[in-house]
Amino acid sequence: MSNKGIYSPKDTKFLMDMEQFPRFGQLELIESINVASAVSTVSFNGLGDNKYDVLFVTCMNVTPSNDNKHLRLRVKVDGATQSGSNYDQEMNRHIVSSVSNLKAQNASQIYLGYNIGTGTGETTNNYHYIYQANNPLKYTFITLHSSSVNYTPYSQLMYGGGQYKVQAKVDGLEYSFSGNDVAVGSKFSLYGIRFS
């Protein structure tokens, strides 16, 4: 392939097959964490060196060490976890035949899963998008989709969003359970969305 700065369809296809041709909206793995022993927090320190306006996180088979706990997210600014009352959130939660609207203003975290248990199959799986984390002049926003089996055990579906309402450059993410450890086998993956 000659390098004249002009690609034929064949050249483009070859580069795409070799994952060397950038595509808009392409996911790029920044870091993946598999919990090998129970830990109080799981953290991503560094969010892709300012390359991404939109981040994408998956939380797979996440469980607490003890029953009936809530999975939460807090951001980091200058490497320090922000636990002040600077988070707002609104979620819709569907359990069996009931629907509830969960709202929180001036909270100390954003919840990603409620009442997660430790029995067989009791886990939470979710994905969420994080917007504007690298922009020090904007609030950081999140949208969430979650599917879980809680401690009762009932299936639950959650969707909604939240914000860290401080204009700051967010440089890390911290995941934890309310008053409990993240159990072995939980997996967290952080991606950047290219050219977002």
Image: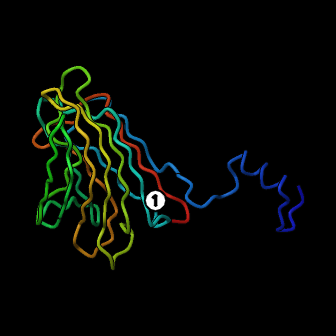
Q: Number of callouts in the render?
A: 1
Q: Quick check: 153 above or below 110? A: above
Q: Position of residue 139 (x, y in %)?
A: 29, 72
The residue at which mark 1 appears reads as 48
Q: Quick check: 99 above or below 169? A: above
| Left or right relative to 116: residue 196 | right
Determine the residue positioned at 16% across, 26% down. Answer: 153
Determine the residue positioned at 63% across, 58% down. Answer: 23
Determine the residue positioned at 25% across, 35% down. Answer: 148
Give the residue at the far top of this rendering. Answer: 120
Q: Position of residue 89 (x, y in %)?
A: 19, 60
Give the residue at the far front of this rendering. Answer: 97
Q: Nearer the viewer, residue 45 or 182?
A: 182
Q: What secondary structure is found at the residue carrying circle 1?
A: loop
Q: Quick check: 49 above or below 178? A: below
Q: Quadrant of residue 154?
A: top left
